[in-house]
Image (cartoon, coloured by chain):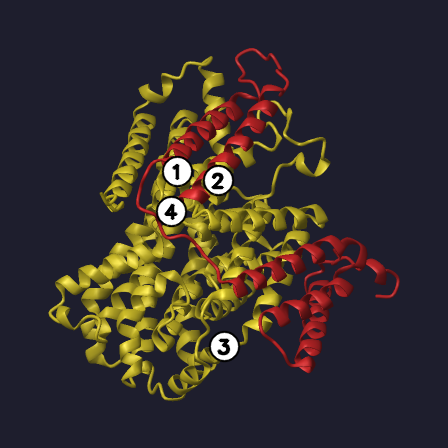
């Protein structure tokens, strides 16, 4: 955990530096008796830097190691698969549309969560995706993107 | 005032409102029951549906879900020894031993009745205290409001964090995110990178979906699964659900302790259901004649935590409705849901829309009533949900998260933001940094900045107003005590380094 704290402190220091740089470049409005737009962000910057410095010092001091969130190799692989599927899905959603993108995404997710029966994979992914699409469209008048199926549905 | 109470009752009792409350309760019972699903998660899933609903119906649905979820959590705790929600952890201590010796029906019945009584007591607290507190809060000036919001933020951080520094850092990251968008006082663009989508800032609900849902999907990948055979066996033979007269007599004291503790803990920002449940369990154990039998499966050991965690719900609604300060993630989401409908919780809600404020209170009452009847009538059917495969449930949740983020503003940008916050939530989990302070900073950050800057503008930069106003000084002192207390508690808990 100490090593993770050190990584967190360094990342947050970099973030605080960037945030401070952007805050310094915020325009001043010069309105009488009115605080500037950078007023509150400077407070946040100060707090960020102070707390990050404390975390950095804590991570360097000797102390009893605290329990950390750990995953087995198999679990890490599954986590990577879920996040990968999610990233691809989010990336292709605008062009493919909800229905076309959701069916393979749903099937992939079902497989990662342990479903192995092909019929269930096909029925589940098509059934839930189509069901949700029309539930939102007809039941709640929320029009999900149609993408490549524009003009067909 | 009386007219508003009457109007509020009528609004809450409209057929559409009652239907929404009823559906919410049913969904809540189901969501609460499924291990790995939290009430926050359930509310996030149904949120997109509420965007197109009338504000009254949408809050009724969410309140039903909140109350139902608290009760539902006890079902899996009793039947499987796996609490459906963290608040039901204490219920498993006596509930599961009772179920294991063939008294599952009796245990479930006691949990249902105790939850109902706890919820009803907290409704009375909400009905009686909220309007009075709102009137007091109306007297607050911007300096007092700043100090109050600041106090809310510190107490939440201290409760939510195992490491106070990480809890505070999480909150400050949230405050930094809040500064994205147009400056609330003079309208200058801040950290928008000339992106039109960022001009209105990061939407709280989008961030919330990512922060809670994606880590939850990952948790369910690695969490142990309930034994389907064991579930089936217990579900098949749980006997009568209605508690006997002797049981009702036995649970009087633990229900009283649980209701009082729960309602009080609910009012305190950050305390929440799990703490209230364990405290009331502990007190009941100490005060009960059967104290030594606690843990072996006694009705009193179920009644105390169950009445407490349901009493928390009404208590938590008090600061949310009167001060606009969320007590836990669920009330933070409820604030977000109200804001989507253009309604800002706070003392003005009772003045400007008193009938709506009372309709929320009475919807909470109906939610407790529906919960009782739905749970008693359909328990045998409801528990079959425990056998629902995760391979279907989790992908459905993933799809609903994407739909929820998109439907908020019909914008793909929000879907990307949701995914970004999901990754941030996972990174914070890896670093053992709590996400709740970040979430609450997203809710409280804007009023914090507005009250601070409004005060300084009105006093021409004189900060002494925060210390000369008695209320402001009181809240600031409480904030300081809260921070020092948290540091001291962390120091006491820390194991000594071996020499």
Q: Earlier in the sequence, mark 3 or mark 4?
A: 4
Residue B63 can be seen, yes or no: no
Q: Chain letter for yellow, please.
A: B
**Is B256 on the left-hand or right-hand side of A26?**
left
Determine the residue positioned at 71% across, 77% down: A122
Question: From the viewer's perspective, is the residue at label 1 or at label 4 nearer?
Answer: 1
- 3D distance between C-alphas at marks 2 and 4: 19 Å
**Separation (CA) of disc 3 from disc 4:** 31 Å
**Separation (CA) of disc 1 from disc 2:** 10 Å
In primary-sequence order, the first of circles 1 and 2 is 2
Residue A59 has which mark?
Answer: 1
Evaluate whether label 1 is on the same chain as label 3: no
Could you say whether the residue bearing mark 1 is in a helix, strand or loop? helix
Residue A109 visible in the picture? yes
Judged from this view, the residue extending furthest toward the front is: B499
Which-is-in-front pick, marks 1 and 3?
Answer: 1
Residue A8 — which label?
2
Q: Residues within 10 Å of mark 3 (few under 14, many from 20)?
A: few
- Image quadrant for the N terminus of chain B? top left
Q: Name the mark on residue B160.
A: 4
């Amino acid at each position: 955990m100490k090593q993770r704290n050190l990584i967190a402190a360094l990342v947050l220091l970099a973030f605080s530096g960037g945030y401070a740089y952007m805050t310094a470049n915020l325009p001043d409005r010069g309105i009488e008796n009115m605080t500037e737009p950078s007023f509150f962000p400077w407070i946040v910057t100060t707090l960020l830097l102070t707390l990050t410095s404390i975390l950095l010092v804590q991570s360097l001091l000797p102390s009893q190691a605290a329990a950390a969130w750990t995953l087995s190799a198999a679990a890490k692989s599954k986590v990577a698969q879920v996040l990968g599927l999610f990233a691809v899905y989010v990336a292709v959603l605008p062009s493919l549309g909800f229905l076309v993108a959701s069916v393979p995404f749903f099937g992939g997710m079902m497989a990662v969560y342990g479903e192995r029966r092909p019929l269930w994979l096909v029925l589940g992914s098509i059934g839930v995706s189509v069901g949700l699409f029309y539930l939102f469209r007809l039941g709640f008048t929320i029009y999900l993107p149609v993408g490549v199926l524009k003009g067909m549905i | 005032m009386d007219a508003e109470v009457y109007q509020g009752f009528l609004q809450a009792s409209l057929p559409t409102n009652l239907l929404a409350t009823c559906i919410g309760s049913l969904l809540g019972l189901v969501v609460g029951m499924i291990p790995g699903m939290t009430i926050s998660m359930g509310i996030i899933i149904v949120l997109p549906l509420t965007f197109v609903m009338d504000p009254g119906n949408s809050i009724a649905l969410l309140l039903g879900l909140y109350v139902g979820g608290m009760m539902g959590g006890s079902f899996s705790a009793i039947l499987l020894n796996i609490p459906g929600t963290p608040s039901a952890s204490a219920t498993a201590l006596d509930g599961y031993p009772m179920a294991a010796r063939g008294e599952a029906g009796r245990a479930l019945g006691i949990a249902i009745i105790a939850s109902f009584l706890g919820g009803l007591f907290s409704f009375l607290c909400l009905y009686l205290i909220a309007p009075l507190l709102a009137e007091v809060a109306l007297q607050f000036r911007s300096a007092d409001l700043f100090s109050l919001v600041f106090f809310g933020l510190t107490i939440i951080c201290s409760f939510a964090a195992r490491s106070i520094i990480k809890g505070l850092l999480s909150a400050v990251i949230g405050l930094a995110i809040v500064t994205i968008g147009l400056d609330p006082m003079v309208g200058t663009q801040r950290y928008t990178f000339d992106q039109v989508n960022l001009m209105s800032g990061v939407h709280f609900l989008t961030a919330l979906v990512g922060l809670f849902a994606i880590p939850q999907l990952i948790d369910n990948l690695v969490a142990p699964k309930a034994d389907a055979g064991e579930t089936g066996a217990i579900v098949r033979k749980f006997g009568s659900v209605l508690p006997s007269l002797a049981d009702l007599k036995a649970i009087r004291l633990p229900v009283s302790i649980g209701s009082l503790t729960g309602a009080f803990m609910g009012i305190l920002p950050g305390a929440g259901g799990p703490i209230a449940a364990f405290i009331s369990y502990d007190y009941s154990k100490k005060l009960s004649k059967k104290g030594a039998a606690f843990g072996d499966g006694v009705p009193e050991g179920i009644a105390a935590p169950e009445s407490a965690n349901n009493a928390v719900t009404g208590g938590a609604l008090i600061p949310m409705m009167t001060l606009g300060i969320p007590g836990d993630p669920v009330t933070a989401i409820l604030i977000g849901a109200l804001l989507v409908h253009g309604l800002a919780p706070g003392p003005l809600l009772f003045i400007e829309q008193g009938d709506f404020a009372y309709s929320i209170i009475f919807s909470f009452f109906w939610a407790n009533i529906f919960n009782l009847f739905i749970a008693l009538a359909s328990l045998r059917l409801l528990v079959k949900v425990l056998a629902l495969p995760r391979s279907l449930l989790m992908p459905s949740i993933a799809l609903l998260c994407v739909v929820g983020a998109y439907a908020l503003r019909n914008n793909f940008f929000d879907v990307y933001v949701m995914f970004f916050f999901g990754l941030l939530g996972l990174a914070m989990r890896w670093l053992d940094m709590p996400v709740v302070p970040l979430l609450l900073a997203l809710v409280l950050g804007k009023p914090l900045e507005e009250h601070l800057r409004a005060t300084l503008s009105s006093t021409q930069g004189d900060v002494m107003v925060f210390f000369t106003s008695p209320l402001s000084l009181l809240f600031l002192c409480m904030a300081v005590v809260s921070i020092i207390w948290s540091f001291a508690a962390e120091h006491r808990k820390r194991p000594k380094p071996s020499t």
